[in-house]
Amino acid sequence: MSSHSDMSSVISFARQPASTRKQSIEVKINDHYSSKVYTSGNPISGEVTITPSHDSRFDFVQIILIGISRTRLDAVQIPQLSSHTFLKLEMPIPASAYPVPRIFEAGRAYTIPFNFVIPHQLTMSACTHKARHDYIQDYHMRLPPTMGGWERDDMAPDMAQVQYVIKARVVRQDELGGKPIKVMEDTHHIKVLPRSPEDPPLNITKQDKNYALSKTKTIRKNIFSSKQGTVTAATAQPGAVYLTADGRGASEGSVLVNLNFEPTSADILPPKVSTVSAKI
């Protein structure tokens, strides 16, 4: 994350026409469109525009990039909802950048630029529990991709969501040590598809119920005839499919399947393969 080169003049001022005056705050991202996808290392720059309809006293402006996960457990009676903020980056705005006194005047448009960079991993505080192996913590330090909110079905369950949001708010604190009061707030959702290294092959054993790299089937002419042999389909774990940075393309992938027929006697011929199908 980087800041503006001259933070002493970070907030610019412009007089608003009287006909368009209203109390609002808006987050604008440069070169953004609704289907744009951001990945690790991508910069995100833009500005927050504040246009108060009346004089608004404030103490500070906060601009943050946050990552939030939400889950829903459909219980018998009442669904259980939970959320977790796994990422929070704040744009520094020095006190010298604010107007004196700290009042946003009616009829003026105030513009505050911001700059963020999508990190390559989460901070150490994101995973503080003990793990048996270091690689488990490495997994927990990875940024999760956006889940839900895509133009097309991302096959994510409805009860799980991951969102990345740029949030801007104007805050006032009436009493010293009192609870901050949100004067204005706006949010802008973005889609993130982070980069991650290719994982090593899975350790699949015969006891694994979720994966099978080989299957064997007994061959008979009919259910009453004797066994003619067995056909075994076997393969190896395929290589990873790589998505492009914008999430719109992917590398090709293939799976080589070997068929092996073992007859019960030498005079039995292999069966004819009439249909081949595959599904994901």
Image (cartoon, rainbow, N blue to C red):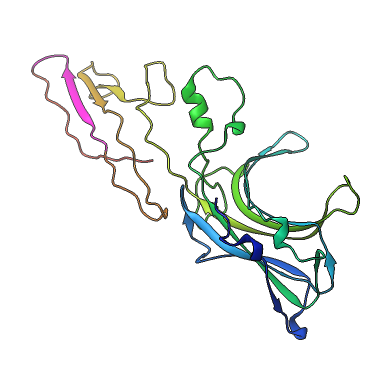
Could you say which quadrant of the image residue 96 lies in?
A: bottom right
Asked whether residue 27 is in view, the answer is: no
Point 42% across, 20% down: residue: 208
Please report the residue visible at 40 percent of the width from the left and 52 percent of the height from the top.
245
Is residue 254 placed above or below 130 in the rendered structure? below
217 shown above or below 115: above
Is residue 41 shown above or below 269? below
Q: Residue furthest right?
A: 175
Residue 170 quadrant: bottom right
Instruction: Give 212 or 217, whichever is nearer the viewer.
Output: 212
Tally of marks: 0
Question: What range of the chain is rendered magenta?
Answer: 255-266
Instruction: Please indicate whether residue 138 sits to the left or right of residue 278 in the image.
Output: right
Residue 17: image location, x then y, percent:
73, 84
Is residue 132 located in the magenta-colored stretch of the structure?
A: no
Residue sitting at 58 percent across and 56 percent down? 3
Residue 58, image x and y in percent?
A: 81, 60
Rendered image quadrant of residue 174? bottom right
Whether residue 115 is visible to the viewer of this picture, yes or no, is yes
